Image (cartoon, helix red, strand yellow):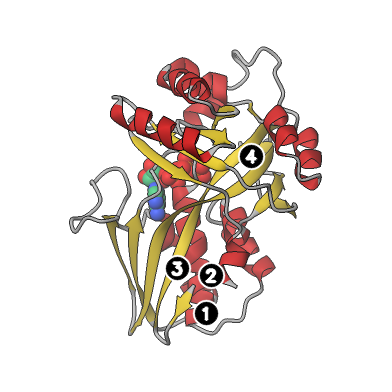
Amino acid sequence: MRAGGIKMEIKAYAKINLGLDVLGCRPDGYHEVRMIMQTVDLYDTVSLEKTEGGITLTVTLLGKEEAYPAGIVPDNEENLAYKAAKLIKDTYEIEEGVRIHLQKRIPAAAGMAGGSTDAAAVLRGMNRLFGLKLSTGELERLGVRLGADVPYCVRGGTALAEGIGEKLTALREAPDCFLLIAKPEVSVSTRYVYEHLGEDTAGYRPDIDGMKKAIEEGSLDGILRCMGNVLQSVTEREYPVIGRLKEQMEAAGAKKALMSGSGPTVFGIFTEEEKARKACETLQAENGAGQIFLTGFISPEKEEG
Ligand code: ATP
């Protein structure tokens, strides 16, 4: 986070799910989950500037001047970043305003928490911009009012997320690897995926405890063995491109490929940089692969110093 008095720029990192299990549906409609979350080095840049009053928001796609394609990411009060600013302003009765600019790089509606991480960045940024001195725990408790993934995005790193995603246990930093991320050109409704869960998962349950243990032991092999997402078969049935991307990545040398969140993003874990690079070039050259990124895990706390 770079703070300069009344203006600042924050990196809002995306996440992937190394493991995702759904335990059931609560009476209020939220699902009980157990997820292993991991921050990846792919981020939106969130700029904040103090103003005399109100909240303004603009959104562009990184590297482009024009506004983000309408209808994909809202540039109004529906945007989670705007909602985060309003929540802070209302809760702490702040008279002054904030100008927010989002430079989007994280694919939208992709299973990478693009909106949640922008909201978390606004919470963290406004905390500093307005000298609120809120702890990370307090920011997480505010964040859950905006969305189940926001508390994790406030904290970042490697973590077990339980409850609706807001009960967090920090885990040891996951071992380094090369990560290929592919977002096919389809958008997935998280709601649709959860509503159709249970129809064809064939009793499959990812081994979240095994994954937790593997992370604590620093074992990439163990992580690869336990990687699993209970939502994958639901989204894959709707969008076969997900299955194809996984096969392509594994044929190109990924030790394992998996869908993140409710999809449709697929990530592949490589241990050899050369293979990851070649796989990236191959996917980029082919149709239907959408946005492709070659990146890795990151621990934001370390990054911020
Ligand atoms: P998750 O992994 O938490 O389920 P996601 O990656 O599937 O999230 P998002 O990128 O957060 O999904 O987008 C979901 C919807 O949220 C989008 O279709 C968009 O309309 C809305 N949205 C609101 N604010 C934002 C934002 N700042 N960035 C992206 N999408 C946003």
Q: Which mark is residue 43?
A: none
* Residue sitting at the far bottom: 5
SS for dot 1: helix
Ligand 1 has an atom within 8 Å of the beta carbon of the residue at disc 1: no
Say if residue 261 shows up in the picture: no
Q: Is residue 240 above or below residue 1?
A: above
How far separated are the C-alphas under marks 2 and 3? 9 Å
Q: Amino acid at mark 2?
A: Arg
Q: Nearer the viewer, mark 3 or mark 4?
A: 3
Mark before the other along the chain sequence, 3 or 4? 3
SS for dot 4: loop
* Residue sitting at the far front: 274
Does the CB distance between marks 1 and 3 fall below 8 Å?
no
Q: Amino acid at mark 4?
A: Asp
Q: Is residue 228 above or below residue 65?
A: above
Say if residue 55 shows up in the picture: yes
How far separated are the C-alphas under marks 3 and 4? 34 Å
Q: Which residue is mark 1?
A: 128
Q: Which residue is mark 4?
A: 28
SS for dot 2: helix
Does the CB distance between marks 1 and 2 fall below 8 Å?
yes
How far separated are the C-alphas under marks 1 and 4? 34 Å
Q: Nearer the viewer, mark 4 or mark 2?
A: 2
Does the CB distance between marks 2 and 3 fall below 8 Å?
yes
Residue in the image at 29% along x and 29% along y:
285
Q: Position of residue 239 (x, y in %)?
A: 42, 20
Horizontally, residue 285 falls left or right of residue 220, namely left
